[in-house]
Image (spheres, coloured by chain):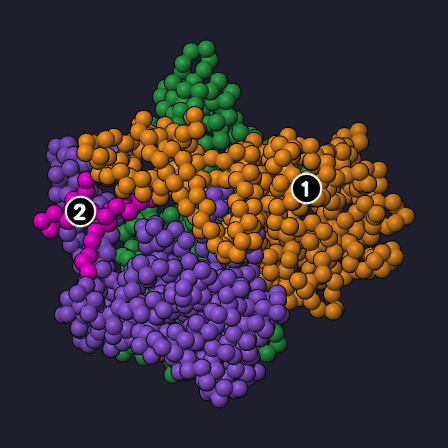
Chain colours: A orange, B green, C purple
Amino acid sequence: MSISRHYEREFVRTFFTSPAAVEGEDDSAKMIQSAAQLRGMQAPDVWVPDNEDATAPSMRDEGVQNIVDVISEYGSDFPGEIHPRVVWHRESPTTRYQGFQQMLEVADPANGAVENLDGFVIPEVGDIDDWKKADEFITIIENEHGLEEGSLSMSVIVESGEAELALGDLREEMGKPSNNLERLFLLVDGQVDYTKAMRAMTPTGELPPWPELRHNTSRGASAAELIAVDGPYDDIRDVEGYHKRMTENRAKGMTGIWSLTPGQVVEANTAPLPPKTGSWLLEVGDREVELDEEDGQQVYSGGDISLETIGDGQYLLEVKGDQQELDEDELREELLNMTAYVPSMDDIVDSMEEFEAAKEAGKGAIAMTRSTTLVIDDIEVNLSNDRMWDEATYQAAQTPVTLFQDVYEHRPDQHEELEEMYGADVVERATSVGN
Amino acid sequence: MSISRHYEREFVRTFFTSPAAVEGEDDSAKMIQSAAQLRGMQAPDVWVPDNEDATAPSMRDEGVQNIVDVISEYGSDFPGEIHPRVVWHRESPTTRYQGFQQMLEVADPANGAVENLDGFVIPEVGDIDDWKKADEFITIIENEHGLEEGSLSMSVIVESGEAELALGDLREEMGKPSNNLERLFLLVDGQVDYTKAMRAMTPTGELPPWPELRHNTSRGASAAELIAVDGPYDDIRDVEGYHKRMTENRAKGMTGIWSLTPGQVVEANTAPLPPKTGSWLLEVGDREVELDEEDGQQVYSGGDISLETIGDGQYLLEVKGDQQELDEDELREELLNMTAYVPSMDDIVDSMEEFEAAKEAGKGAIAMTRSTTLVIDDIEVNLSNDRMWDEATYQAAQTPVTLFQDVYEHRPDQHEELEEMYGADVVERATSVGN
Amino acid sequence: MSISRHYEREFVRTFFTSPAAVEGEDDSAKMIQSAAQLRGMQAPDVWVPDNEDATAPSMRDEGVQNIVDVISEYGSDFPGEIHPRVVWHRESPTTRYQGFQQMLEVADPANGAVENLDGFVIPEVGDIDDWKKADEFITIIENEHGLEEGSLSMSVIVESGEAELALGDLREEMGKPSNNLERLFLLVDGQVDYTKAMRAMTPTGELPPWPELRHNTSRGASAAELIAVDGPYDDIRDVEGYHKRMTENRAKGMTGIWSLTPGQVVEANTAPLPPKTGSWLLEVGDREVELDEEDGQQVYSGGDISLETIGDGQYLLEVKGDQQELDEDELREELLNMTAYVPSMDDIVDSMEEFEAAKEAGKGAIAMTRSTTLVIDDIEVNLSNDRMWDEATYQAAQTPVTLFQDVYEHRPDQHEELEEMYGADVVERATSVGN
């Protein structure tokens, strides 16, 4: 690939912000001190001491000092990357100059934090020329402090229409000799301020879903070899909603998400990894229902589907009130269309190994078979599904495994939990397959 | 902000078109005469005497004359802005030249309409160079007629893929010294002709929803500080559908919509304003059900949810056939996740005032609590929901209030109806909060 | 229109790929030999002998030879266009040079295939500069082989974020004198590799829906006067799913779709054509149910709606558990809102003829009435729906007819099947209306 990256990670699952200075506490650095000591699944891939929105304007000088102190003390042992967020605004030169001063101070080698500092997060950027202003400040900081040009990465929060448009320019702009935009790392959506900038409203005040923004961020990241991260999920108690959002995001190629608490970090570190055990889904109308496994059979126990025999090898299948009379083959075909299998990590590694062996033997495509017995109203139906795998299928299936390998390489502090989750054998095979 | 706008309004709720000349009537100007006399909620924010699609080609010379006459007679008293639509087509120089001639005539000071004319609507534009052709004609017209350069605004109807692409170029192009695109005002979607240009088809012939077009229009407007307006909603009798569409649009940041009748104008002028009274919603599957308030309690009376006690402080909750056994705390948590509150204007103003006071007292974030009693199958459950408000939440919540204030400032003819709707006290507080 | 096209078709319904060389068969050209002999509804509009993913890397030299042989032998009688796919990759100069060599050989007049060759399909393109590299190779090939410049068309497969972004540049780039991008023909989505490039994941491994990609492809095609084609639908047995996808695509202006088997070709050749007979739909919640016609009445027999009389001309209508008491007019209004009509080819032609006659008589808009009797729980309700048709409605309704006419003109081998489907009379009227 033609853009030379300044960082190693291919994936970032978690972007965890902590207030840099909290008012009214004995020690205003309390929050970032405790965040800096997180380890394992509770520790994010990217940690963001936040000197912008999470810290009151009057506390931001203290916030800079806290960031310097905490990174100096805890930074070398922190298992993820560290990217403080400073202030910035596309429409305010005052704020931009403050952001420059904050970065200049945090990165000053005399303060002792810079060697454990990976980069900065710039919020509220505007169009590409605004991104270049931040990039130029960082270049000047590197130069003033005798750091290698491009050694500090830059991540941005997309919170305006013009920043969303800039996502389409990155690939072209990053090559130009007049900037150092190759330092770009994360493209993060910031839906609260984006919603404000777009002047959008919902009846309940909850954030709109903004599917196009997430697509454009993910696409921009893909085209410029960067990493896309979704914005904060406010309703901290709604774990199911957070998971649903992450599943949606992964289908858009956006693997990372903001986390507001260590609990959310655990969820978001875990969610993109393939499950320990596979499961069968049944599609009923627009919903997907997970089936219960009982003695190796998949049992449907909901009320939306019923099945009965009506003599002569004929069946009556009713799905949400729609009835069909089917013979055994038709029934099997119908149910096969309604089911889907969620493979486990083990299954994925198996399939990849099988395809690799077939390729070695000169075959370009093989059929992978998946079988089960589905039980509805005590009637058992054996299902068997073939899926053709060719090189392209293989490579697409590889994404979760590559993610796993990337995690395994960069997060030794999570090895133990990963082995507990999958078993040592699966972890070992998963780290070596496909290489 | 860097782009100097030539108009004052920040929001346009309604874009109402009337045929400039109707065939077979005693007076072909009948429709625009009556439209010009609309007042209050029936009068649109932007009124568009339409000399394009709504007027037969053979009637368009008469249409120009009618527009001049009606604006001269009624324009100074009309409470909204006046922007006639002339003919234009990206692929026809003949049509473009006709459009130029129509504008030249309407804006001629000798005809007496120009002082009440706010701008022109240009349909069927193509890529940005085509927009510049229309802009240049208007510059020439201003010069010929001794009007100030940029004094006539220009709105466009997006009805082609190339115009949709141009939405991404506006911010950059509007700054260039070789054009006067700063005169741009509304970006309006025209889905009938857009559908034709995209050669899209639906089985019933109804228009596709085009969510990406609406997003791109809204984003283009946001990035270039313009105003986005959705296209016509054909099914005039379907008031519920019109409201659903507007709710969807506001979640995209598109506050304005086309209106085809004074009845639609009333709906579209009212819909974006916060409701008089708050209400509770219950999310059941993919649907949101509004609850009935009875004696201050929120009663669910649908058939999709049932609740019963099963002894020992345990409850059985069934939602669309899925059963859960829950203790009281789990039940509360589950129901809390399923409910949402739609705040009234009064609620929004209250919350803003409360946050302002907290900020004054040095707090950056406060919890807003919302409580109620939910009743399902005669079982009462007390719910209480906290939501954190910080500066960003405050500013996002402000959008409907800013809209209200904008309406209040520019539409004195609606003051009476607004006071009837909300009460004088709420109106007064809503006009002063946040300033 | 300003871009001079080098091809005649306006629509492409079907893009059918066949492996150029299959390993382990007596005759490795078997698949393309049989594909080349397809006729009528089984023959695609565009046939793609595939020397990329469907052919093993070790077989690709043989694949080139097979393509040359089969096109030479069968090409002149093949009823669709022939566009072989060669290898290409935006990130591999080796692969690009191989692609050049493959095209050079296939197009060599000495080999006898070029006179029946319509163009090439280039997969895995990157940004617009990468598209230009392929274009330049084709220009060189035309020059070397003494072919007219621009006579070979070029279609691309969009399988990366950067290629998706390039879709927005086409209109502007195609006019430049330094390239021959006017040779562009099809913009085809390739979701398997796109999903890989975007690093997207779904739990079951099925492809994400990528609605924005399809929109952007369709819009890019519309803006640059090209033709948009959706990617392969893997689940060959799921005919219903394939149809659902095509219906969705047509609502996006994407008429064409990839076909993997002659069975899929038949489905995809037929689906975009208007149906033989009209039908009524009833919208129940988010689902549309097709009604059963019995003796000219439309009968609802599902379980989600019930209707009963409750005396005094009052009715109780229950839709998914929500009850309403309505008088006869309200009932009619409510049901009217819930119904929609899918017009037949005959209906569309009728309406167009009616509107043409009205226009001839000087009317700009007429009401089209559609009536039926709806039967729910043995209660009959007469419904009558007016829809206003103006010039824009007429032109939008014309799309399926234009498609039909395009098919009729370019696919004489399908005339017989079309006449069987619609009857000779409807075919005749449909081929002449609107011209």
> What is the x, y in percent for residue A56?
72, 41
Q: Mark 2 lies on which chain?
A: C
Residue B48 can be seen, yes or no: no
Tag of residue B75:
none
Residue placed at 16% from the left, 50% from the top? C383
State left or right for residue B83 relative to residue A108: left
Looking at this view, is C182 or B207 the one in front? C182
Q: What residue type is labelled 1?
A: Tyr
State left or right for residue A1 relative to residue C325: right
Q: Name the residue under label 2.
A: C292
Name the quadrant containing residue B97. bottom left
Q: Residue furthest toward the top?
A: B312
Looking at this view, is C220 or B376 the one in front? C220
Looking at this view, is B309 or C346 the one in front? C346
Secondary structure of the residue carrying numbered label 1: helix
Q: Residue furthest toward the bottom?
A: C146
Residue C62 can be seen, yes or no: yes
State left or right for residue A295 relative to residue C272: right
Magenta range is C276-301
> What is the x, y in percent for residue A32?
75, 36
Q: Mark 1 points at which residue?
A: A408
> What is the x, y in percent for residue A29?
78, 35
> What is the x, y in percent for residue A214?
55, 51
Is C404 rendered above or below residue A366? below
Name the quadrant containing residue C97. bottom right
Q: Residue furthest toward the right?
A: A110
Q: What residue type is labelled 2?
A: Asp
Looking at this view, is C293 or B197 the one in front? C293
| Separation of marks 1 and 2 at Cα, in angstroms | 58 Å
Secondary structure of the residue carrying numbered label 2: strand
Residue placed at 52% from the left, 51% from the top? A358
